[in-house]
Image (spheres, coloured by chain):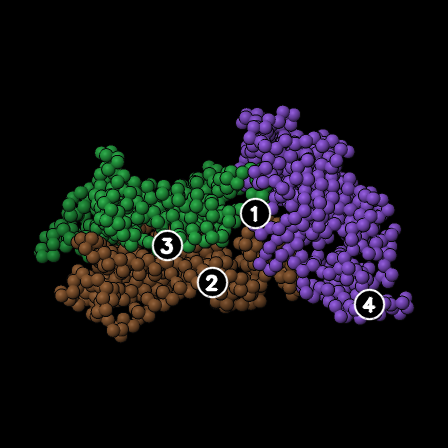
Amino acid sequence: MGKYFLRRSIQLVVVAFIISILAFLLVHLLPGDPSVTILGPNDTAQNRAILLKQLGLNKPLWQQYTTWLTAVFHGNLGQSYLNHESVVHILATGFPIDLELIVISQIIAFAVAIPLALFTSRRPNRPVDNVATTGTFGLLALPPFVIAPILVAVFAVGLNWFPATGFVPLTQDPWANLQHMILPSVAITFGSIAVYYRLLRSDLISTLQQDFITMARSKGLSNRRIMWRHAFRPSTFSLLAAAGVNIGGLIAGTFIVEYLFALSGIGFSLVQAVNQRDYLVVQGISLVVALAYVILQFIVDFLFTVVDPRVSRG
Amino acid sequence: MPDDRELASTHAADQLLGDRFPGMAATDELVVSRQSEALDSDDILLRRPLGILFWLALAWVAVVALAAIFANVLPLHNPNFQNYNAINQGPSFHYLLGTDDLGRDLLSRLVFGARVSLIVGFVSVAIGMAVGGTGGLVSGYLGGAVDGSLNALSFVILAYPAIVAVIAIVAFWGQSLWKITIIIGVGTIPLLFRVVRASSLSFANRDFVIAAKTMGATTPRILFREILPNVVPVALTFGLITVAGVIVIEGSLAFLGLSVKLPTPSWGNLISEGTSNGNISINPLILLWPSLCMFLLLLSINLIGDRLRQRFDIREGLL
Amino acid sequence: MSAVRRTRGRTLEFKDVHDGGGPLLAVEDLHTAFRTTRGTVRAVDGVSFELQAGTTLGIVGESGSGKTVLSRSIMGLLPPHDVLRSGTVHFAGHELTAMKPSELRQVWGAELSMIFQDPMTALNPVKRIGKQITESLLLHLDMDKKEAASTAVELLRSVGIPSPEERVRWYPFQLSGGMRQRVMIAIALACAPRLVLADEPTTGLDVTVQAQILDLLGDLQRERHMAVILVTHDLGVVASRADEIIVMYAGRIVERAPADTLFHDTHMPYTKALMESIPRLADPAGTRLTAIPGRPPDLIHPPKGCRFAPRCPYAQTKCLEAEPPLRTAGSPDHLFACWFPLVNGVSTAPAPVAGNGAAATTLPDGPGDTATATAQAASGGTDAAAPGSGDGPTAGGETEAEA
């Protein structure tokens, strides 16, 4: 058990290190000049050289990297070239929004996908199952940039049930916060529902053919109990793995709804920063996002051992 | 032992109800899957029809593809011609799907926009498959340190938010259709590498491969004659799913104005136009048509992919 | 342990069926068929028998003889769809075949339980074994958690698991095969059922462990006065342990007798063939075991006539045309289905057909082919026998050729 986690932890550190190099290199190997971003295209070459020197961008790459990494270890991710906002501050204001979007959308996704899969997997390829399974293809075909405008058109503009844009912090007014978050959360939940449902259903169908399910029946347990207590847990491997990848992708992948609903999450901040060549912001955010992704996979690996004790002890 | 196969097939039902008869879920699916262990592959192919949905999906993809290919030849308005005398019109004989807020023909913008989705979707996955798929095939079979590090590297790259790289490169290199296609194609390499590698690895030590090896088959021969045919179903199925994913990525970029340069239409920027400047309330058709087309295209590709998956008997968890 | 049985939420009362006061289990003309994409598989095709409380019944047959489906079918533990079942099963004064699922669940695990073949796959891999035992205690005996937990420890002790206090927290994968099967027995016996259906309980185990497990089961059975149905492919397993033995072939009973009678006065050639395939320590080294040639028939298109005829060394024309009924032999408790039964180990068939059985191994036995192919084999065999005996049934040969 301890060995298993030790090995995974070492892997985590190595991967994090490689990611930091990647996050650094990608930005610096890209053509384009940050001095143009900062000073505008019409400034003199002399001024540019001075600026680059000030920013330390004239030093060799490896020196820039170690300087940056040392600062990162001290909790300093640098600041925006454009508005001098610190990257840590951008993350601190943006992350709660992304976290809330992810939490709400994932609660909806699990609350829909799990009961539905438990229900249809008992009678696969029957009408209810066929409708549900085909229906999830419909959900899969509604990515945020397709469904979000429709949600806005119907529920914000048409019915006026929810505000179309904006954000109210949870601490300020929980109810208003929820009203602002519900449409963007729903817009990103569709794909999750479809993926979770299909994976769980397919794993449940094969679990239900196992002898231990027949055994559970022979004890006189109710179907409900068999589904939840015996069939569900051994069927969650694909679900967990997919949830890890999916949530990891959502950390920076919610930029469409952030843009459309005018939420200042880190996804859209990142997209904006890339577009504006705001080096340190891109570097800092992408480092944190990639690390979060890797840590998430680590958590998923841990959950595997909770779901099935054989993973760590077998 | 040729008889074994024959026996197995005649006694499939018998085995099915033999000593290891699973109790609970012997529904069609169980019965079918149990039999498929024993029956010949021909039987599997005959087993389940593809269904009307599959053919409808294929038909829609074909219609979109044909429209996109022959967009220049079709009797369409210029997609960028602004007719200020016909702003925000509903469907009519002259403008079959209506016009937008600048008086442009929605049908023609839709047809030209289809080009972007389809070209980016299929060509970039073809690029990714050619490089990543081939690499995965060879790497998974040969194994060793190179394979191990490539696999680890692909994992790390996948952890990095790919959209950053794509947007950054597009912004510098230029927002042309082919450049975007190549950039996204390169972005799919690690993903397709991992999937094909895993599949190739699972066949590398199977008996038929070892048999070929002991008979002195060369490595390229084993790769292309023995392993490739077995990997193709997984690659094809996963490739189709990736096509749908890539179309979504291009659409998202276009929605933000980061894909092909305006006014070149793409479904993503058409949706974006439909969303902006009060178009939602004044002329919902601008939003409706591209959303509908995108929905149907993604639905069709996913359906085709899933039917192929069922036919090839690939478990959903593997993809 | 079963003395206090509270009945909260239970709608069924169980009569105590005393020894001699009517059977504990009565199966009457039970049929079970499965609809598959290839056709209807008649896995159990008209089986009737009775079982007294506290006794052991062995059900023996090859793979695919329908013995496992029979045991599941008695219990009603069948897939929810595409199953056709007819006939009746009476158990302890109740008709199981007429019960609603909710009523059946009160019987399952409480009065009637099952031991499965492979404890590796039949125990839930991700649940501690203690939990798997207490589950039915909590459900059927209305115990509280603490009581159930201590009962689980006692049960593990009674099936011979060392340091059970510790083992209740183990997972199945941490136990050896024999230990797992002991756990399975503990689960099956947890609520002190009246009847235990043991489906090949020792097939996956080492030979030495097999005997231990079967002895354990026998001891517990005597202690608790349970009836046991022991389903196996191995006549050797039931020989000394069963009071009565049923031999099944292709979904039907072909011979049924008290264990002693079955071994000493075998009537059915199939039973004899099964016996000859048991290895014996007394046999001199190098003795070849007699295998039964061919395979059990396709249950979608069972052969006409006696279902064993295509593989029977003594098959006659009649055997291929008419199905023999189950009739009594010398004593009323010995039943068999054969036109030309063995008497003192010798067939009563007029012209023993040499080589029929042997020939069957090389013949294709597709569903349609079986009858014809065997007919040819039978006629060929008859011809070969004709010169010697002089009264070869030539007419029979013609009939078979038409078939």
Q: Is residue B148 visible?
A: no
Please tell me which residue lies in front, C258 or B251.
Answer: C258
Image height check: is A157 above or below B177? above
Label 4 chain ID: C
Q: Which mark is residue C80?
A: 1
Q: Which residue is mark 3?
A: A138
Residue under the image location 49 percent in, 52 percent down? A126
Residue under the image location 27 percent in, 52 percent down? A150
Among the chains, which one is brown?
B
**Which three-letter amino acid code belongs to the residue tagged 3?**
Gly
- Does residue A146 appear to the left or right of A214 in the view shown? left
Q: Are marks 3 and 4 in contact (CB under 8 Å)?
A: no
Among the chains, which one is purple?
C
Disc 3 residue crowd, few under 14, some 14–19, many 20+, Cα 10 Å: many
Q: Which mark is residue C396?
A: 4
SS at badge 3: helix
**Which three-letter amino acid code belongs to the residue tagged 4?**
Gly
Q: Are marks 1 and 2 in contact (CB under 8 Å)?
A: no
Report x, y in % for residue A217.
57, 41
